[in-house]
Image: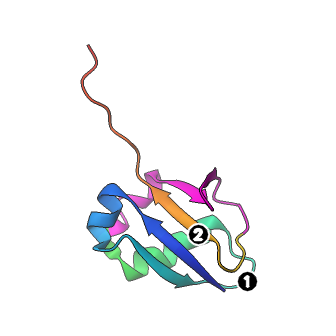
Amino acid sequence: MQIRVKLFAILKDAAGTGAFILELPEGATAGDVREPLIEQYPGLARYIPRVAFAVNQTYASIDVKLSPGDEVALIPPVSGGNEG
């Protein structure tokens, strides 16, 4: 099945793209995006353990089952400014 993957911030910079189509087997989960993503964009490997996932614009756990045409967004952790 095909899903759309969106990357933001440092992930987008590391991959050199913000969105692409990924082919996954039926029954795949949001977490199943990780391995093919790293294979295609090795520069993302260091960030993947800390990203949040969203499926169809809703934060989701890595075990959420995907359907054809779903959008999976990977969102890097946000670092704050100085606390006073």
User: Residue at image x 72%, y 75%?
Assistant: 67
Q: Quadrant of the N terminus?
A: bottom right
Q: Is residue 11 above or below residue 4?
A: above
Q: Quadrant of the C terminus?
A: top left
- Residue 30 is situated, as x and y percent measured from the top left of the image, at 62, 66
User: Residue at image x 59%, y 69%?
Assistant: 71
- Residue 70 is situated, as x and y percent measured from the top left of the image, at 64, 72
Q: Is residue 27 above or below residue 45?
A: below
Residue of label 2: 71
The residue nearer to you, when weighing 26 against 12, is 12
Q: Which residues are magenta?
A: 44-65
Residue of label 1: 26
* Residue 55, disc: none
User: Residue at image x 59%, y 78%?
Assistant: 3
User: Residue at image x 30%, y 57%?
Assistant: 10
Residue 11 as seen in the image, left or right of residue 55 = left
Residue 48 as seen in the image, left or right of residue 22 = left
The residue nearer to you, when weighing 46 against 68, is 68
Residue 71 as seen in the image, left or right of residue 41 = right
Give the CA distance from mark 1 to mark 2: 15 Å
The kind of secondary structure element at disc 2 is strand
The kind of secondary structure element at disc 1 is loop
61 is within the stretch colored magenta: yes
